[in-house]
Image (spheres, grey):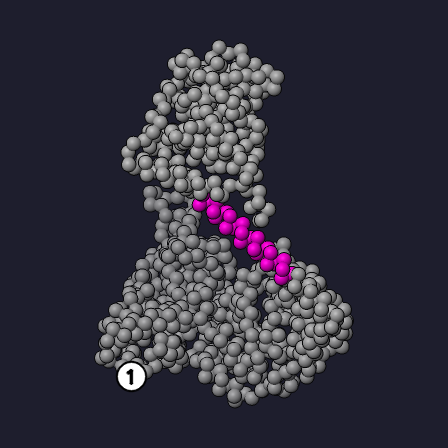
Amino acid sequence: MLRLLKNYRLPMRRFFSDDFILEQSEDAAKTGQNTELLRLLPVAKHPIFPKHFIRFKLTSENFKFLVGDTHSHYAGAFVMRPKEDTKELETNSTLLSILPVKGIEQIYPIGSLCQTSFNKFDRTVVLKPLNRTKIIEVIEPISDTIPFPLVKVEHIPEPINSVSSEEDQTFLKLLSTYLDDLRGLLTPQELTTLEMFAQRYNMRYDLDLVNYVGVILSYMCDTAKIQRIFEPIELGQRIKATAELVQGHVQMRNSMRKLQTEAQEKMSKASEEHMYKEILNLVKNKLGHDKDEKETLKAKFMKNLEGKKVPEHIQKVIDEEMEKFMMTDKNAHEFHVMRNYLDWLTALPYGVHTEETMDLVKAKEILDRDHYGMKDVKDRILEFIAVSKLRGSSTGKILCFSGPPGVGKTSIAKSIAEALNRKYFRISVGGLDDVAELKGHRRTYIGAQPGKIISALKTAGAENAVILIDEIDKIGKRNYQGSPENTLLEILDPVQNNNFTDHYLDTSIDLSKILFLCTANYPDDINPVLMDRMDVINVQGYTAEEKLMIFDKHLYPQTLTKCSMDEKKNILEFSLDAKMTLIKDYCREAGVRSLQKITTRILEKIARKIVEGFSDKILIDHNNLIEFAGRPQFTEKRLYDILPPGVVMGLAYTSMGGSVLYIEIAKAKFNGEENEGKIQMTGNLKQVMSESIQIAYTYSRKFASEKKNSFLDKHSIHMHVPEGATPKDGPSAGITITTALLSLAFNKPVIPDLAMTGEISLTGKVLPIGGLKEKMVAAKREGVKTVILPKQNMHHWDELSDVLKEGLKPYFVEDYNEVYDIAFGVNR
């Protein structure tokens, strides 16, 4: 940077070379003053001010053209407009050359009328400016034979030599002051050049002073700025513009000088500090203190290993690295690399364990304290702890909690760690696409670090920690940086992870004592090979009754504390109907995250009222709930009060819980009969559901033909699933679609308050489905009284709570004939 600042003035010295001429010019001939037709000579960088003669180089072709041209005794020197991407300081050859341009639009319209003088020995032309002139029109445009256009010009009369107004006199004084300031910032070489320029001008005349300053600035400022002080007609305007430009340039020079001084001081200080450090290092080496500093670090590393059972192969690596560390100069780059490596290698918890608790009673208390419901999940966890107690260790199994968002998968992992009295650490791998994030970077890279697994082990401080790998279904797939998903195969395999090798440590580490837990929303997205290493525990969504208990026991007290309203809880009350309205009309997802958000929103509004001075008791009930929570997102009103023929209610399972799914089928064409029926599908249906529709359509045509009904064979059908913006997929709507097709074919509606779910095969077999609990929650919320379910899901029905099953009459079927009889009330 200092070199750049020192060279800042070099271009100016380069431009002030022998290419300008200070010899006395001849009197401008009267013919020149009256000349209206001129050859336009495009000059680069800056306009030519009167009394400032400049020599330009020409190519041989251009020189011959101008010498032989009858209009070349006088020429117009006009400045080329600079390109946006050109640099301000160009090369000397470009500045002092006259080069043809492609069009007149590249030229500033105001330039100088110059008398020309040609030198045939070096093919140069001297331009002696007489006065300013303006382009009126082009007489001879540029062509292959005419490099310089012939233009008609209008001469601009030069203003009077002096100004008389008070304002102009003020700016003239300012200009003189700024010029003195500028002289104080120039080098001796630049000052000498300025004195040479001054010989051509009489400073007693204001016009000469302005032209003189313009010549000076021509070699310091860019083209556009110089052209702006060259063009004004009135002398007062030129003085004002010139004074402002000189002032700006002085400020810029002052700033550059300040930066140069600061850079010199900084470099001088850095050089001085470096010298003192070298002297200090030499003194330390002479006195042996350098060795003492290394001994201090060595003692620190050895202290890290106290009380640990370091494996033999790792101890060997530590000893070798320690020996190299003591022999390496501390100013070398390798010294800091080895220091960080030893710091990591000695900080890991070799042989350090927390005393594990296998108390089932305590574990059950902790799980019940932190989570309501989830009986199946808690039973699986307690069974896992019981087996671990009999075996004496809880290793050898990887648990994966699968379920919709907000049901407590992450929090239950933390409860397991507390129940086992183990250290807990969470790693989120959602979106992770670099293997080095898990296995670390090799030490050859600058700033290399171990991966997340080793970092978690160091942070936990125990070999038997509980490490939660969160969002494992969203981990990145294979790319140019490797496959993080395949890396987990080694980490989560109890047989292999006792010899896990991190790229940074480059030695095997035992991970077999770690209890790995995983969470996922979509287990189908997990690599089947990776899934095979895990024991999947399905965490189902909550019913409305369970959400009510969670609200009272967990969400409401926690939100009160979060909003600092524990002391105000006596003046605040939620009615039962308000709670149920929140659950059913505002928060229908499987989890309770939205319920927590809406509760926080309500308490924040109440907090504002309290701060504003409201002190009465606040009862939130069905009447004022909208005031605090806003309009409900859902309504209790059904899409159909009475189902017409061709419409059947199905049940769907999404990542946010269960919902009802109406299947609507209608005749597609009404003008005459058709030879063969076809089916059209709408509603944002994905591949699996589209295939299920084709299966249901084929079976329905067969079923109807057996009952002597040819409606589906003769008519085109349009099937639609409402809420077209929502993607829909899966095979579980098979019997629902079949029933809707037959309902239209027989022009017969299904029985009231009926919903069904089940996959159908091409032969009419009813196959099992998933998400039964969430679907039953949706059915009960919709007011369904009768549900048709696959017989293979009967054990799932038995696992549901009595509260959820209350009011629902199930029918378990194996074949579609049973579905038909139930749906249309045959033989009931």
The total number of labels drawn is 1
| Nearest to the observer: residue 770 or residue 599 | 599
Task: Name the residue located 52 percent from the left edge and 22 percent from the top edge.
Answer: 23
Task: Name the residue located 76 percent from the left edge and 69 percent from the top edge.
Answer: 327
| Nearest to the observer: residue 408 or residue 508 | 508
Q: Is residue 327 visible?
A: yes
| Majority SS type along the magenta span | helix
Horizontal side of 240 relative to 408 (left or right) equals left
**In this view, which residue lies farthest toward the front?**
204
Horizontal side of 664 relative to 507 (left or right) equals left
Task: Name the residue located 47 percent from the left edge and 47 percent from the top edge.
Answer: 254
Horizontal side of 147 relative to 613 (left or right) equals right
Q: Is residue 787 magenta?
A: no
Reading the image, the residue beneath label 1 is 570
Q: Decide: is 570 above or below 17.
A: below
Secondary structure at badge 1 equals helix
Q: Decide: is 231 above or below 504.
A: above
On the rendered image, what quadrant is the C terminus found in?
bottom left
- Residue 69 location, x and y as percent? 51, 11
- Residue 759 location, x and y as percent? 48, 63
Q: Decide: is 622 above or below 228.
A: below
Q: The disc labelled 1 sits on which kind of residue?
A: Asn
Q: Which residues are magenta?
A: 249-274
| Nearest to the observer: residue 154 or residue 277 | 277
Q: Is residue 256 magenta?
A: yes
